């Protein structure tokens, strides 16, 4: 049996025994009602004879009683190991319908009265608590509901206020009314606690004129919760500086709290907390308000000291939004010996770090705490406080893919980060040496324990926690596969409320950056099973984090176990190479002076399917005359201009020439682009050489002198023209 389940069962067993005793001897506090004057206030921290019990359950016997014992299901704030004294109703052998009834108060028609209650619940009970009133306190049917008392979380003290205007003059009593109308077991699941009650006439109207100021030269008091700016540096060396901070006296008997002193036990000016002989101590010294940003870290540097025999404890707290005792969060318990030291080395620790988990207003606070009255030796001084944003440091270096990690070994979690964004931080992802234990339907263990990363509920708050990977460089257009083996508890599976997903983000400290959900992780209690697999891509190339995200509105139902994780680029089938489009704008131009032909063209930018070629593609261009390969041009860029010059002799220049250009890419040839050029050698004296003729020129003596009359000197020549069809013509030409 899991420890918590065993603990609850043990406490319920004790309670059922107590219920039997009460049934045998009768309920307590059944004294006659009395009438008391307003204003009226009571805390239920001890037994009393003025409130009574009215048990209207179908099976009376177990009802409201005093309890200050945590082991007997007392009220424990935050599930602490000490109980807050209260009147409570826990289990009931029958369906609970129980009233804890006040004395009578004389109320007048037309007047408004303010009723305040302090109450709590335990174990996420389905039972409901309401505050009700009546003029007949012994008749359960006569009560009228003033309001249900909303208590969404267990182990939290709720202080509520309600206004009531009675319809007629009379004697009215009030009651805490406990019921359980849920569809489940109604007899053993109540756990409701009354901690305090008050009623007073509500006074309205204008604020009376205080008259003239008796001390006009006295400076106005500072505005509460002043705005602070970072970096912040405060030295408490004057009353004016101290006044920029505020105090909260949450002691049982308020009266003594933090104050400015010009000379403390060391003879130094300070914000000082000293002897409080009247009660236990719970007092805050609260900073101005600071606007902090999620994902940023802030350092708090403190110069503080304690008296030589001090036993008063100092705690560094903070508030988010507004300051109240119910809104306190702790950075660190500093202790009673200041300056604080670390371990056996005795190194002084005077700096602490807060990682802001959301954008908002933050107030830092020093809490002086003692469970009994302070003595003359108890003294703490704060001399100075610095608050500043911590530098981000060097950015993460992306981890190469493929990536694979097992969480069986603790050292493998070093590159991962837990990010807690619950309403109350404190429970989040971490490595667990015990790890995961599989259970069958009868809660018998199956197989071995498996060390892993785990999340084991967020009691009394929501669960909203991320387990964040190292950084990965991902490219747009590529597909990636993420895989992980996970498990859940059987109770979590049965509750069916937990959300367990895998997300993608760009900042491991900012929740809103994880805006892409890769998919839901199946809730399953089996250790050895196929992994959850997620296929995804990114729209923009960049650095990304993968995170396991667990959430649950109740918190207590959230359990998760992660055994491993891998990320790799998906291997697809090799693409079949495709030929490029042919070259464009191929032209052939004769250069008469050089007996040459110049070819020019534009290399392609797309393949035959119309897709763009890579900008760095290396094209090979082949140039042909007829079927004769003239040249192979390598490393040609898409879209570049290509050229080639074909030199000829005087005998071969004239006549028709055919050229083609072919592009080769990834061993695929493009369609040929072609061009045809006929070179005509002009004669003089009216002799025209046919376009398809080959020309030869001789002297009268028969010596060959070329094929271009324009380059010959004066004289008489024999010109022979041979056409493509074989016919010949010979003429005599004189220059």
Image (cartoon, helix red, strand yellow):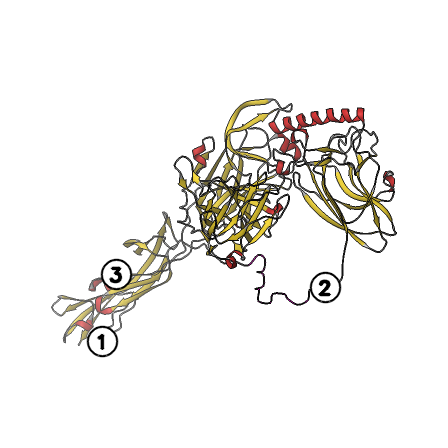
In contact (CB < 8 Å): disc 3 and disc 1: no
Relative image position of residue 283 (x, y in whole percent): 58, 46
State which tag comes first along the sequence, 2 or 3.
Answer: 2
Q: Nearer the viewer, mark 2 or mark 3?
A: 2
Q: Can you tell which mark lies on residue 646?
A: 3
In this rendering, would 158 be left or right of 315?
right
Residue 35 in percent (x, y) is at: 83, 44
Magenta residue check for 225: yes
Provide the major secondary structure of the magenta segment: loop
Furthest toward the left, the residue is 701
Disc 3 packing (10 Å; few <14; some 14–19; many ≥20): some
The numbered mark at residue 684 is 1
Q: Secondary structure at mark 3?
A: strand
Q: Residues within 10 Å of mark 2 (few under 14, many from 20)?
A: few
Q: Residue 500 — which label?
A: none
Residue 361 found in image quarter: bottom right
Q: Nearer the viewer, mark 2 or mark 1?
A: 2
- Secondary structure of residue under mark 2: loop
- Give x and y (percent) for residue 579: 40, 51
**Residue 397 coordinates in the image, percent (x, y):** 40, 46
Task: State the CA–CA distance, disc 2 to disc 1.
Answer: 127 Å
* In the foreground, 231 or 367: 367
Region in magenta: 211-226
Q: Is residue 520 magenta?
A: no
Vertical placement of residue 304 versus 715, above or below: above
Query: Mark 3 vs mark 1: which is more N-terminal?
Result: 3
Residue in view at x 66 percent, y 34 percent: 495
The answer to whether residue 101 shows anywhere in this view is yes
Q: Which mark is residue 208?
A: 2
């Amino acid at each position: 049996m899991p420890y918590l389940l065993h603990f609850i069962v043990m406490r319920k067993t004790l309670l059922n025994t107590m219920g039997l005793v009460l049934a045998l001897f009768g309920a307590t506090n059944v004294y006659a009602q009395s009438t008391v004057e307003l204003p009226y206030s009571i805390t239920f921290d001890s037994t009393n004879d003025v409130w009574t019990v009215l048990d209207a359950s179908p099976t009376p016997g177990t009802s409201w009683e005093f309890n200050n014992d945590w082991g007997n299901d007392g009220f424990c704030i935050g599930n602490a190991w000490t109980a807050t004294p209260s009147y409570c109703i826990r289990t009931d052998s029958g369906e609970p319908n129980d009233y804890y009834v006040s004395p009578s108060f004389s109320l007048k028609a037309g007047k408004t009265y303010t009723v305040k209650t302090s109450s709590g619940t335990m174990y996420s009970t389905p039972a409901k608590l309401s505050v009700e009133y009546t003029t007949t306190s012994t008749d359960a049917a006569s009560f009228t509901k003033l309001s249900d008392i909303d208590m969404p979380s267990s182990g939290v003290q709720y202080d509520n206020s309600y206004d009531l205007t009675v319809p007629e003059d009379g004697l009215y009593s009030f009651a805490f009314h406990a019921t359980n109308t849920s569809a489940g077991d109604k007899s053993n699941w109540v756990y409701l606690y009354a901690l305090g009650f008050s009623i007073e006439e509500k006074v309205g109207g204008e604020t009376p004129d205080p008259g003239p100021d008796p001390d006009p030269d006295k400076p106005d008091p500072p505005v509460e919760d002043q705005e602070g700016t970072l970096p912040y540096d405060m030295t408490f060396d004057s009353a004016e500086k101290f006044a920029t901070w505020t105090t909260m006296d949450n002691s049982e008997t308020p009266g003594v709290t933090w104050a400015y002193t010009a000379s403390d036990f060391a003879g130094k000016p300070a914000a000082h907390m000293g002897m409080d002989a009247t009660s236990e101590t719970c007092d805050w010294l609260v900073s101005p308000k600071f606007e902090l940003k999620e994902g940023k870290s802030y350092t708090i540097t403190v110069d503080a000291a304690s008296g030589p025999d001090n036993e008063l404890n100092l705690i560094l707290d903070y508030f988010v939004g507004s300051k109240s005792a119910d809104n306190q969060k702790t950075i660190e318990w500093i202790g009673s010996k200041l300056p604080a030291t670390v371990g056996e080395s005795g190194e002084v620790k005077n700096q602490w770090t807060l990682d802001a988990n959301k954008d908002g207003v933050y107030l830092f606070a020093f809490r002086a705490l003692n469970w009994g009255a302070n003595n003359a030796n108890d003294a703490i001084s704060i001399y100075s406080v610095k608050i500043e944003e911590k530098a981000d440091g060097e950015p993460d270096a992306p981890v190469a893919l493929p990536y694979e990690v097992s969480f069986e070994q603790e050292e493998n979690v070093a590159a991962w980060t837990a990010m807690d964004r619950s309403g109350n931080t404190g429970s989040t992802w971490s490595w667990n040496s015990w790890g995961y234990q599989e259970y069958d339907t009868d809660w018998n263990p199956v197989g071995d324990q498996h060390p892993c990363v785990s999340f084991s509920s967020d009691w009394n708050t929501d669960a909203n926690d991320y387990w964040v990977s190292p950084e990965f460089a991902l490219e747009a257009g590529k597909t990636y596969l993420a895989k992980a083996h996970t498990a859940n508890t059987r109770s979590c599976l049965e509750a069916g409320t937990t959300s367990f997903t895998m997300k993608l983000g760009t900042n491991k400290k900012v929740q809103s950056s994880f805006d892409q959900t890769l998919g839901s992780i199946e809730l399953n209690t089996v250790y050895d099973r196929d992994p959850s697999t997620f296929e995804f891509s990114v729209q923009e190339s960049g650095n990304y984090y993968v995170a396991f995200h667990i959430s649950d509105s109740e918190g207590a139902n959230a359990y998760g176990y992660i055994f491993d994780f891998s990320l790799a680029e998906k291997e697809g089938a090799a693409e079949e190479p495709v030929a490029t489009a042919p070259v464009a704008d191929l032209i052939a131009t004769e250069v008469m002076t050089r007996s040459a032909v110049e070819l020019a063209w534009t290399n392609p930018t797309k393949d035959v399917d119309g897709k763009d070629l890579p900008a760095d593609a290396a094209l090979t261009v082949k140039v042909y005359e007829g079927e004769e390969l003239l040249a192979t041009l390598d490393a040609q860029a898409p879209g570049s201009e290509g050229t080639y010059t074909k030199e000829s002799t005087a005998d071969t220049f004239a006549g028709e020439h055919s050229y083609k250009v072919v592009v080769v890419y990834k061993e695929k040839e493009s369609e040929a682009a072609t061009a045809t050029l006929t070179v005509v050698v002009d004669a003089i004296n009216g002799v025209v050489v046919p376009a398809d003729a080959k020309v030869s020129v001789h002297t009268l003596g028969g010596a060959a002198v070329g094929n271009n009359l324009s380059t010959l000197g004066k004289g008489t020549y024999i010109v022979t023209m041979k056409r493509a069809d074989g016919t010949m013509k010979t003429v005599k030409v004189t220059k």
